[in-house]
Image: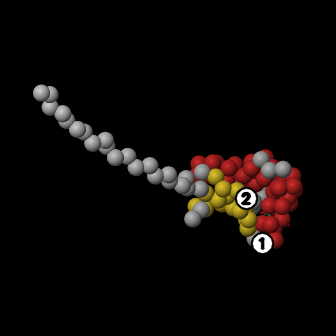
Amino acid sequence: MANIVTLRKTRSATRTERPKLWKVILLNDDYTPREFVVSVLKRVFRMSEDEAALVMLAAHRQGACVVAVFTREVAETKTAQANEAGLSKGYPLTFTTERED
Ligand code: TYC
């Protein structure tokens, strides 16, 4: 009679990891014109005029404002593009990136 071999199926656990996200933060300064901040938010972060104006005003009034959250690479790329836009015009416009908890 043939031997019967029973093999246990390798256990596979499915765990869904939450993707880590990075915040892009806009910092207020006293020199960058409001319209320029709005234009950068529209171009780099694809915001409407109204959204961009609200975010710019929030940073202006509070000192800083979260623009959006992205995966790390997208957050870093957009932060660099937005900072370069300010630098190219000689403005101290600053965006930073921070890991979301
Ligand atoms: N505070 C600037 C001004 O009065 C405008 C400004 C708003 C600059 C938001 C940066 O993140 C900023 N001209």
In-front residue for pair 11/75: 11
Answer with left or right where residue 83 lies relative to residue 5.
right
In-front residue for pair 27/52: 52
Disc ID at residue 62? 1
Number of on-image labels: 2
Q: Earlier in the sequence, mark 2 or mark 1?
A: 1
In-front residue for pair 36/58: 58
- State the residue at coordinates (58%, 61%): 99
Image spot of residue 84 (x, y percent): 71, 51
Inter-mark Cα distance, 2 to 1:
13 Å
The residue labelled by disc 2 is 67
Residue 81 drawn above or below residue 56:
above
Q: For the view shown, which residue lies furthest in the top direction?
A: 1
Image spot of residue 98 (x, y percent): 61, 62
Asked if residue 6 shows in the view, the reply is: yes
The 10 Å Cα crowd at callout 2, few under 14, some 14 to 19, many 20 or more, is many
The 10 Å Cα crowd at callout 1, few under 14, some 14 to 19, many 20 or more, is few
- State the residue at coordinates (77%, 47%): 46
Q: Amino acid at mark 2?
A: Val
